Amino acid sequence: MEITEHFFKTTRHETFYLAAGNQDDPLIYLIHGWPDLSLGWIKQISYLAELGYRVIAPDMRGYGRSTIHLNHSDYCQKEIVADMLELHTSFSKEKAIWIGHDWGSLVVWNIGLHHQERVEAIASLCVPFGWGGHPDSYLDHIDRKLYPKEEYPYGQWDYMYFYYENFDLACRQMAEDPYKLIKLNFTKPSEEYKSCFNAGIGAKSMTASIRKHGGWFKHYGFKGLHSIPDVPVDQALISEDEAFTYGHFLEKNGFFGPNSWYVNGKLNDEYAHELRQFTTIDCPVLFIQATYDSVLTKNFNTHNKMVCTKLTEKEVASGHWMAREKPEKTNKIIKEWLGTIN
């Protein structure tokens, strides 16, 4: 199935997106997170199009070939949701199926809450309902046997506080070599290398020690303090060409945009409060848990059943990068779920 490239521009934002499938077919959006691109869905785009869907995978604001905005507040959820709704109007369809991963899941959840008239169904990979506000709200759910409060006050969410406290430093450390960062990020954990978001069950996430170490890369001291190790490309997750593409756009655009998604907790909480009352999501919802995701662990799935009235929950034995690591299993689950809603 051919995948084509497009741009959609309004007075406030320009979105680049990949597309596949017949324009008259039902619409599916694939929404990526940090530090991803539309390319992150490459193993789903053609697959879903061949099932009979028009598939749209955008570069989100701050990423790739979409607009790079200059203020932290430009990356709050309300602005990002507006980007997607404007893009949606260009396709002359009332509703769509929205599928997200990582921060893209937060966009999908928010569209489901605030704009149910635009939603046929929702699927979230890794991220359960209830996240995206200030990380203070996450602390009660931390596994204190794994992360004793005295040593790990913020648990696996420590890295988010590092963004709030040392935003410029975090960006500089990552900008040292974006290509190396991408290779490290899209890596399954091993004895030699720790991946940012993947670990064995019951193992501590490296994200729990970022503030203590003064940055992301002190874990790799054998390569030099605060330097990004040059790990091999993990071909099970990403190709060499894809890694270069990711690195190119991060070097070109910088990390201000992608990292700003993390520091809008207050504005995101205010956006949630605009609903003014408890709101359920009444369309079909699919949530897929990643077994080895060391940040979004199972104990954080506390809100799905409370909010989603037509909920399907599945699990894939993968790390955080589920759609890349286990595409066949992920695609099969999505296909079976789609069959229940049509």
Image: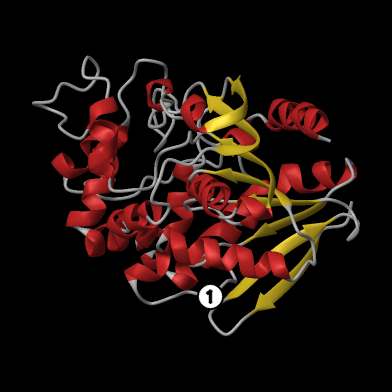
Three-letter code for the amino acid on which mark 1 is drawn: Thr
Q: Give whichever of 211, 8 is nearer the camera.
A: 8
Which corner quadrant of the image does residue 57 belong to? bottom right
Q: Is residue 101 above or below residue 89?
A: above
Whole-percent x, y for residue 141 in the image: 29, 26
Residue, disc 1: 67
Q: Residue at x 48, y 47 (%)?
A: 106
Vertically, is 218 above or below 91? above
Asked whether 169 or 156 is in front, the reply is 156
Q: Is residue 18 visible?
A: yes
Q: Where does residue 58 sit, x and y in percent of width and height?
A: 64, 61
Quarter residue 10 falls in: bottom right
* Residue 267 drawn at (x, y percent): 32, 60
Colour scheme of the picture? secondary structure
Q: Residue at x 31, y 61 (%)?
A: 171
Q: Give x and y (percent) for residue 241.
A: 65, 54
Q: Is residue 342 above or below residue 75?
A: above
Residue drawn at point x = 43 percent, y = 29 percent: 303
235 relative position to 190: left or right: right
